Image (tube, rainbow, N blue to C red):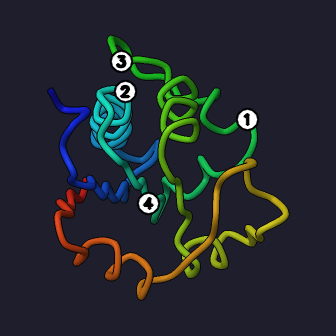
Amino acid sequence: MLGVMARTLVVKATAGADAPERCAQAFTVAATAAAAGVEVSLWLTGESTWFALPGRAEQFELPHSAPLAELLHVILTTGRVTACTQCAARRDIGPGDVLPGVRIAGAAVFVEEAMAEGAQALVY
């Protein structure tokens, strides 16, 4: 049923290892929606920006939560993952540093996605 919906889910993850439950919730919701056929755009901001780098999601652990690397893989395979331009710059992360399929973009692109017809934005 969800696969026929013409809506887009834009999820902004603002936490990383500093708030693991909030971080895992963002990735879990995004991956669940993507697996159900919903068009998903996951934004990595703040401390979650680190997960744009190879190997970082594998280091994340939270009891009773799906592995972050697996959730990220689902989203990268079926949706779109974006690292915030300013957040990446503050962490010295450039386009050549991120996982294949991750783009770096700024607030204007986030606003465009969030305000698109049929879009639903969630911030964690």
Q: Nearer the viewer, residue 59 or 99?
A: 99
| Viewer-side label of 1, 2 | 2
Query: Mark 1 belongs to which amino acid?
Result: Gly
Q: Is residue 20 visible?
A: no
Q: CA distance from mark 4 to mark 1?
A: 18 Å
Q: Earlier in the sequence, mark 1 or mark 3?
A: 1
Query: Mark 2 belongs to which amino acid?
Result: Ala
Q: Are marks 3 and 4 in contact (CB under 8 Å)?
A: no
For residue 4, side relative to residue 19 (left or right): left
Query: Label 2, on which residue?
Result: 35
Furthest toward the bottom, the residue is 108
Q: Quadrant of the N terminus?
A: top left
Residue name at image x 42 percent, y 47 percent: 18
Q: Are marks 4 and 2 in contact (CB under 8 Å)?
A: no
Q: Is residue 74 above or below residue 122?
A: above
Indicate the position of residue 28 as horizontal and vertical percent values: 33, 31
Residue name at image x 68 percent, y 51 percent: 101
Residue name at image x 49 percent, y 53 percent: 48
Indicate the position of residue 12 as horizontal and vertical percent values: 34, 59
Q: CA distance from mark 1 to mark 2?
A: 22 Å
Tell me, for residue 65, which label it has, or none: 3
Q: Secondary structure at mark 4?
A: strand
Q: Nearer the viewer, residue 37 or 55?
A: 37
Query: Mark 4 belongs to which amino acid?
Result: Trp
Tell me, for residue 55, which label it has, or none: 1
For residue 58, side relative to residue 63 (left or right): right
| Viewer-side label of 4, 2 | 2
Q: Earlier in the sequence, mark 4 or mark 1?
A: 4
Indicate the position of residue 67 as horizontal and vertical percent values: 49, 20
Q: CA distance from mark 1 to mark 3?
A: 18 Å
Query: Label 4, on which residue?
Result: 43
Q: CA distance from mark 3 to mark 4?
A: 20 Å
